[in-house]
Image (tube, helix red, strand yellow):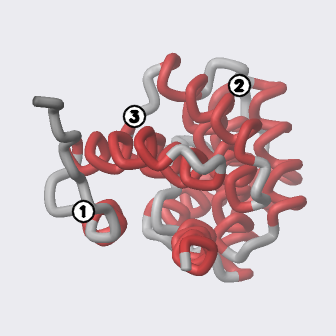
Amino acid sequence: MRTFVLAVALAALSAGGARAAVTVFGSDSATQCSKAAIDGKSDAASENYCTRALNEDTLMGDDRAGTFVNRGVMKLRRGQFEASHADFDAALALAPKMAEAWVNRGAMWVGERQYQSGLADLNRALELGVKEPEKAYYDRALAYEGMDDEKAAYFDYQKALELRPNWELPQHELLRFHVTRPTLPG
């Protein structure tokens, strides 16, 4: 049962439930790529904006790195882990302190069931001050569950919900937990 529940949670992860896109102000293609990623799109036409911006436009520094992140997010939403991994690595090579690249690569690792690697990247994203930390906590909870650390997973789902009240993903996951207090002797 736990394996099935974790598989459902991981399916929600790759479906785009907790992805962190990056706002890019650059060329028209880069801006369209950014808008599409933020709006939750992952279709071929949206990804094409990103590829066009990366191949044809002069994007510098964080705008180029952010465009790699946004394209990687679209690939991650489609479950294309290897392709998204390449984009997140390219972003980190350009901007190693871009927290959104770390959080998305962490999510990619969790989707690949490489929980320890995912945990390391998600922790790095939190250290760097990711803009939407609730997404990192949610993804980290999935990693903890994959590592059979239900207590840590519970607290991270709680933290995600505390940071973004009424968010359905952690609310749904928390319904599976039954918290009991230890009985004291005597």
Q: Position of residue 27 (x, y in %)?
A: 63, 49
Nearest to viewer (mark 3 / mark 2):
3
Disc sitting over residue 61 in the figure: 2
In the picture of the structure, the residue carrying the numbered disc 3 is 131
Q: Amino acid at mark 3?
A: Lys
Task: Residue lying at the far front in this picture: please name it.
Answer: 186
Q: Which residue is mark 1?
A: 167
User: Mark 3, residues whose alpha carbon is within 10 Å: few (<14), some, or many (≥20)?
Assistant: some
Q: What residue is shown at x 47% (from left), y 41% (from top)? A: 136
Q: Callout 2: 10 Å neighbours few (<14), some, many (20+)?
A: few
Residue 49 location (% of width, % of height): 70, 66
Residue 33 vertical placement versus 102 (above, below) = below
Nearer the N terminus, badge 1 or badge 2? Answer: 2
Q: What's the CA distance linking mark 1 and mark 3?
A: 16 Å
Horizontal and vertical percent for residue 107? Answer: 63, 51
Q: Quadrant of residue 28?
A: bottom right
Identify the amino acid type marked 2: Gly
Q: Position of residue 1 (x, y in %)?
A: 55, 80
Q: Secondary structure at mark 3?
A: loop
Q: Is residue 82 visible?
A: yes
